[in-house]
Image: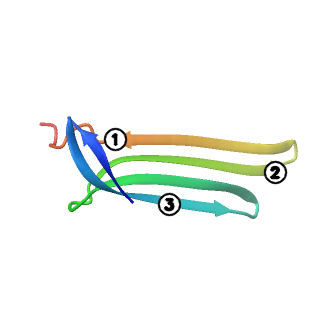
Amino acid sequence: GTSTVVVQSKRLQTVHIREVASFSGGQTGSNVADTWYETGTYLPLKGTWSTDVHTASPVGMSTMTARGRFGLSALTPAS
């Protein structure tokens, strides 16, 4: 879909892409990633992701959970 992201007080039109993956087998789990790209330039302005992985082990289920995010802090490169 489309939405607005603010960078340095400037409202930018974006395209929001969500990627969802799940897996099974020796390990089970899922990954979700959201990225907002500036319309026209497709510069990634912000993003979030989360991953959950479950693995059976001799002592029980092992779970790995990770989360992350990024956001553009300026529209021009640092000097």
**What residue is pinned by disc 2?**
56
Q: CA distance from mark 3 to mark 2?
A: 26 Å
Is 76 displayed left or right of 12 in the figure?
Answer: left
Mark 3 and mark 2 lie on one chain; the one further toward the N terminus is: 3
N-term-proximal mark, 1 vs 2 = 2
Instruction: Name the residue located 45 percent from the left edge and 52 percent from the top edge.
Output: 34
- Which residue is identified by label 1? 71
Q: Are marks 1 and 3 in contact (CB under 8 Å)?
A: no
Tell me which residue sits at (58%, 42%) in the image: 66
Q: Amino acid at mark 1?
A: Gly
Task: Tell me the residue at 44%/41% (across/down).
Answer: 69
Residue furthest to the left: 79
Residue position for label 3: 19
Q: CA distance from mark 1 to mark 3?
A: 18 Å
Pointer 1 with pointer 2, Cβ within 8 A:
no
User: Which amino acid is tagged 3?
Assistant: Glu
The three-letter code of the residue at mark 2 reads Ala
Mark 1 residue crowding within 10 angstroms, few (<14) / some (14–19) / many (20+)? some
- Quarter of the image with the C terminus is top left
Mark before the other along the chain sequence, 1 or 3: 3
> Quarter-wise, where is residue 1 in the image?
bottom left
